[in-house]
Image (tube, rainbow, N blue to C red):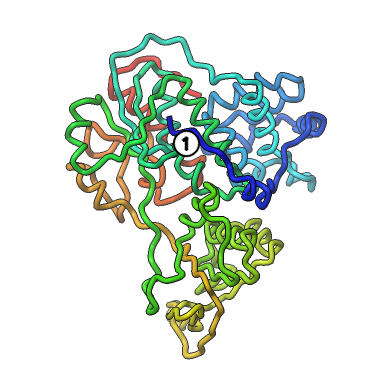
Amino acid sequence: MGTAFTPHAGITARFPELKPALTPQAAMVEANRCLNCFDAPCTAACPTHIDVPRFIKKIATGNIAGSARSILEANVLAGSCARVCPVEVLCEGSCVMHHRAEKPIMIGRLQRYAMDNFYGRGLQIPVRERPELPLRVACIGGGPASLACAAELRQAGVQVTVFDKRDLAGGLNTYGVAEYKQRVSESLREVEAIQSMGVEILQREIGLEDFEALEQEFDAIFLGVGLGEMHRLRIPGGEAGVMDALDLIAGYKTGEILSIGRTVAVIGCGNTAIDAAVASKRLGADEVHIVYRRGPEEMSAFGFEYEHALQEGVKFLWWRQPIALEAGTLLCAATAINEAGELVVGEMRTELAAEVVVPAIGQSPLAEWLSSVKGIQFAKGRVVVDRATGATSHAKYFAGGDCVNGGREVVDAVADGKRAARGITAALGVMEVAHG
């Protein structure tokens, strides 16, 4: 089934939650702070448009299960999104409390409170009463986009099979989110909930030779395959001591990596780089540096992630570019912006002790694999879709998530999956598609 997993006790102990669950009393107090705004900028800021005032009001009145059901109408992966969404720049970032010089409502933690209560009581995702349709859709990829698409299709009575090449389903939620934000078991709990809706999940890799058979077997195919391998450093010194950031995160989350070198250099300064650097500290590294070829004002990591890394003891080396790796030493060149606005490498060199080097410099698209599907249009390695429906240039294929947007938040993938499901049902002639 792809959900059997036993967490490693040592990892659980080293990665306690950053944001512990609210107590019932604290949740009630926080819910009662909400002004239940009529225009709800928090709802508008959420890519899945969860009715935030509605679910918070239900918490305030003690209807916790009803609150969770309200959330699930819009976002079937609401438990994960409550933990991993950058709420500081989405719902909470739009809270009107900012204009009152007051602390924004803790929307993410209230959402988690409702969803934890829901699953803790053994409740199941409500499935609308619909006739079972003789329509079959394949969702390739077991991550958030495919799971959201599959759940929405089930609500319309469509039969869905999800194909996932990894041992555990859930994609990024299971393997790629820092453990102190979300545990593997919490991701798998949502996978099981979606399975309980009647979604079939098969742990099977789809090869280039499989598409023709899938097109014959299924009425439509959703591509939610994410991105490919991380970009390599490609500097002199080989690959000894080099481990890409996603492998590091997946490795420790599944208990396969329990320690790391004494000195670690993480290359890049996005949110994944921050997660890898903090993980390295918690896995026992004495010195962890993030090496970035530009300055702090240009890093793609969120500010709160950067602040967290500082608190964990991670050090930042700005305006440096790795140029060689040898015997546990990373040689970096100074960089600068010239008068033409271009990044240039200077003469100054810096040596940095690094038993382990962790590139976190973005992932490559799955262009070669995807290009085997004849008739699908690509641009810059991404699948081109109609945003409103997820439809590709091939009538039978739809797509969403990172393979379309190049790599965004989990909640964006969920929104993509929902839109594509509605595009698929419309294309297949399914009437009265319910909207969350």
Residue type for callout 1: Val
Residue at the spot x=54%, y=49% of the render? 255
Residue 344 percent location from the top left of the image = 44, 81
Q: In this view, does 237 lie to the left or right of 206?
A: right
Quadrant of the rendering where the N terminus is positioned: top left
Q: Residue 240, position in %: x, y?
A: 42, 71
- Residue on which disc 1 sits: 414
Q: Residue at 36%, 47% (x, y): give it.
A: 403
Is residue 386 visible in the rendered image? The answer is: no
Q: Which residue is drawn at 61% across and 71% down?
A: 316
Per the image, label 1 sits on a secondary structure element best described as helix
Q: Which of 337 and 21 is in front in this view?
A: 21
Image coordinates of residue 131 in percent, x first then y, are: 38, 9
In the image, residue 181 sits, relative to residue 152, either above or below, namely below
Q: In this view, does 107 lie to the left or right of 302?
A: right
Percent position of residue 361, x then y: 45, 63
Q: Which corner quadrant of the image does residue 419 belong to? A: top left
| Residue found 49% across the figure and 46% down from its top | 175
